[in-house]
Image (cartoon, grey):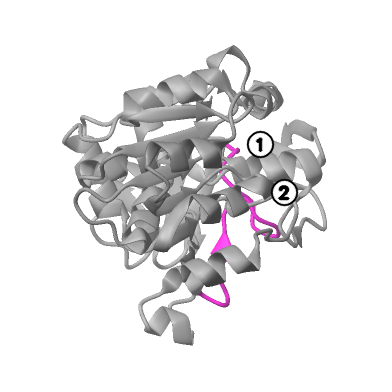
């Protein structure tokens, strides 16, 4: 079968790889249909690592994906051949302390699609745990199925934000995750919602997803702008989703006294930068968001009801043979790109 394998920074090759074996107990085999390109994928594409995790050899990227069940392993119930599904790319052990406490996103033995040594979804077929596959309603397309993963990330971050009706919110970074955070904050009753970014078309999308005011960080000081808009008070909750070094400190500076900062993004440099005096004197609650847990059913319900526009996130589509072109476009945000999808096959 054909796969797109990353050999090093910006060195992605289309090549043959072995077919997966028949699915084992509790597994299904999927024909991959749609794969989204995430910011963390772009870290691997550009510098060959995410935080302190680097690949020791070639790896197939792709963790936002949907597929069609083509084979069912022993003991699998509730999934049938031909069924379209969205997949959670995280595979916890379900036996460690964190898993048993209900936090599989913090599993100490977590396997993750597209993170060395585990190949991801930029290939024609793969085996995956059945309990990490969620049937897609007919109303949702394969692309929307792939976008359920970033929506799940957003839902988990919102759980950590503990928003209340009429809380003020700042979202730093208007990529796919940031746009979904804006929409979820609007659904939760947040007022007002501020958004910051440096790319004009992403700021325009932020308005469409529910931001009341947007600030281009190349034109204004975003901290001063948010403080001015809130009469110097700051926001109740700041959600950092920009993957930029300076945005963590900006989020802390934007938050009000006693406010809450949720860090969702992954910085290129494996370090956190903020003024300790700001966080301490304000008495901030700073929360790190690690993936998601138990969010897919809620994500599917929101998308199926039309409360969150997943279709509008996807602006560009490429075939698997042009996966490298898809990554180059996603990296530069050119041509109005929001989420770029690789269409591996059609359901």
38 vs 347, nearest the viewer: 38
Q: Which range is magenta? A: 107-124
Q: Which image quarter holds the N terminus?
A: top right
Q: Is residue 7 visible?
A: yes
Return the mark for residue 28: none
Foreground: disc 2 or disc 1: 2
CA distance for labels 2 and 1: 26 Å
Residue 155 to residue 143: above or below: below
Few, some or many residues within 10 Å of mark 2 (<14, 14–19, 20+):
some
Residue 145 to residue 258: above or below: above
Q: Position of residue 197 (x, y in %)?
A: 55, 31
Q: Secondary structure at mark 2?
A: loop
SS assignment for the magenta stretch, majority: loop
247 vs 11, nearest the viewer: 247
Tell me which residue sits at (52%, 46%) in the image.
241
Return the mark for residue 268: 2
The residue labelled by disc 1 is: 3
Tell me which residue sits at (53%, 56%) in the image.
252
């Amino acid at each position: 079968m054909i796969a797109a394998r990353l050999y090093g920074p910006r060195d992605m090759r289309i090549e043959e790889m072995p077919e997966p074996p028949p699915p084992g107990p509790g597994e299904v085999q999927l024909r991959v249909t749609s794969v989204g390109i995430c910011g963390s994928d772009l870290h691997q594409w550009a510098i060959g690592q995410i935080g302190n995790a680097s690949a020791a050899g070639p790896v197939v990227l792709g963790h936002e994906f949907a597929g069609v069940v083509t084979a069912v392993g022993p003991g699998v119930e509730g999934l049938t051949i031909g069924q379209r599904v969205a997949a959670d790319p995280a595979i916890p052990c379900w036996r460690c302390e964190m898993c048993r406490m209900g936090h599989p996103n913090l599993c100490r033995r977590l396997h993750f699609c597209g993170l060395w040594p585990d190949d991801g979804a930029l290939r024609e077929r793969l085996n995956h745990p059945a309990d990490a596959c969620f049937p897609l309603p007919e109303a949702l397309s394969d692309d929307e199925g792939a976008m359920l993963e970033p929506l799940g990330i957003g839902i988990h971050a919102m759980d950590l934000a503990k928003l209340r009706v009429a809380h003020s919110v700042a979202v730093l970074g208007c990529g796919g995750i940031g746009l979904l955070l804006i929409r979820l904050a609007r659904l939760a009753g947040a007022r007002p919602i501020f958004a910051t970014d440096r790319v004009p078309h992403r700021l325009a999308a932020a308005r469409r997803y529910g931001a009341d005011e947007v600030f281009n960080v190349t034109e204004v000081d975003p901290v001063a702008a948010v403080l001015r808009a809130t009469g110097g008070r700051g926001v109740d909750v700041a959600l950092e989703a920009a993957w930029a070094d300076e945005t963590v400190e900006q989020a802390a500076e934007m938050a009000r006294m006693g406010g809450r900062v949720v860090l969702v993004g992954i910085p290129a440099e494996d370090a956190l930068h903020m003024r300790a005096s700001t966080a301490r004197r304000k008495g901030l609650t700073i929360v790190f968001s690690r993936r998601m847990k138990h969010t897919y059913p809620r994500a599917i319900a929101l998308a199926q009801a039309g409360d969150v526009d997943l279709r509008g996130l996807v602006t560009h589509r490429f075939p698997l043979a042009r996966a490298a072109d898809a990554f180059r476009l996603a990296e530069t945000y050119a041509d109005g790109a929001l989420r770029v999808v690789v269409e591996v096959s059609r359901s």
